[in-house]
Image (cartoon, helix red, strand yellow):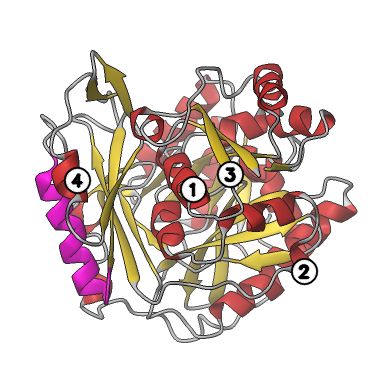
Amino acid sequence: MKVLVVGPGGREHAIVRSLLADPYVSEVHAAPGNAGIAQIVPVHSLNASDPAAVTELAVRLGTDLVVVGPEAPLAAGVSDAVREAGIPVFGPSKEAAQLEASKAFAKQVMAAANVPTAMARVAANADEAADALDTFGAPYVVKDDGLAAGKGVVVTSDRGDALAHAAACFDAGGTVVIEEYLDGPEVSLFVLSDGRHVVPLAPAQDFKRIFDNDEGPNTGGMGAYSPLEWAPANLVDDVIARVAQPTVDEMAARGTPFVGVLYCGLALTSRGMRVIEFNARFGDPETQAVLARLKTPLGGLLLAAAKGELDAMEQLKWDPRTAVAVVVASENYPDAPRTGDPILGLVEAEAIDGVHVLHAGTSLEANEIVSAGGRVLAVVALGEDLTQARNLAYAGVSEIGLEGSQHRTDIALKASRSEIVVPAGSAGVDNEKGLL
């Protein structure tokens, strides 16, 4: 099987790496890829959000499966164009990708499917925003309704900051979704869907804020780990029964079947499990940690989803070890990342047993790998337990040389110390619809 992976980041590097380990995958290509991906598979320079360009490449390569990684190509209709050309594609249609592209749409779907989520209001102007903020009270949660690469959410106790974020979204021609604040630890669960059937992967937890102790602005994600030893034993079954399957059923009933991965961002609150958000693709950097543990061949799994055959899949197999991924970001990320600096120590980091490095924002200039984005690398380690995996990951990070770079030092630290508290009653799920 020949596979084309669309996208430039760390998530795509993780997918490519897993596909290469699949004995049924004979060839992998990536477009546009990055410097790390280019070291292991052929890469093709193109605009990943151009449906015609992606389709032309897939046809020319004789591709058996196209995997669309990022959200922007999905929202641009890349999957639709590839499907129309008769090529199986893992990634939802433009209409189905509205589950991520519009938070208001996602809330409507959740309400129709009786999926538990935060109560929310959609605001289109300053007066509506102020009224919604006063209804829910602090801490305030304000989300850009459209795509924002994981950085369109502000959670603050400062009403002025909340209003300012809403105003910035209005000035850009958008709307905002204002929600009640959800307490409790957060969980990410990827659920593969073929439009009718669903298959869950292993839960993970990511770290969205730039600084230790969850301080500073939101980012695309500064690290992740999997599995979650502290999560309720019935969590995955609850998510499938109360969230994923009802959502997939609702999308099918609307005539827009969801084929791809439904990223369920969850909060385990004192009032039960709640959906924070849906994404229509693999999350980054959770993918780097989750796929490091997946033993079931990835290519066959994604092809089964693309062809509507997930019901025939056997139970997934997992490496029993723990995976930790630590992101190395550029100076000034997430505001105005510094780029163009050489990256040193990659060979030394990967020489550590159990460690591999996945590229995100990198490029090759004059035969030298340099930074080319905000999140530059993810150092991923597998260990016998969370403490060992953390130690190995940070040993790898210590080998990386990138001027001005930054990383969090507390990825999975609380979990390794058994300090994560799951509120009583979080395993139960009520039927709060969440859209006011």
Between label 2 and label 3, give the one nearer the viewer.
Answer: 3
How far apart, in angstroms, are the residues tagged by discs 2 and 3?
22 Å
Magenta stretch holds residue 387? yes
Task: State the SS at label 2.
Answer: helix
Residue carrying label 2 = 312
Confirm whether residue 409 shows in the render.
no
Q: Is 297 situated above or below 240? A: above
Residue bounds of the magenta highlight: 383-400
Between label 2 and label 4, give the one nearer the viewer.
Answer: 2
Task: State the SS at label 3.
Answer: loop
Question: Toward the viewer: 166 or 235?
Answer: 235
Chief secondary structure of the magenta span?
helix
Residue 360 percent across, percent down from the top left: 36, 36
| Few, some or many residues within 10 Å of mark 4 (<14, 14–19, 20+) | many
Residue 300 percent across, percent down from the top left: 65, 56
Of the numbered discs 2 and 4, the one sitting upstream in the chain is 2
Q: Is residue 406 found left or right of 40 in the rendered image?
A: left
Kind of residue indicated by mark 1: Leu
Kind of residue indicated by mark 3: Ser
Of the numbered discs 3 and 1, the one sitting upstream in the chain is 1
How far apart, in angstroms, are the residues tagged by discs 1 and 4?
29 Å
Image-quadrant location for residue 186? bottom left
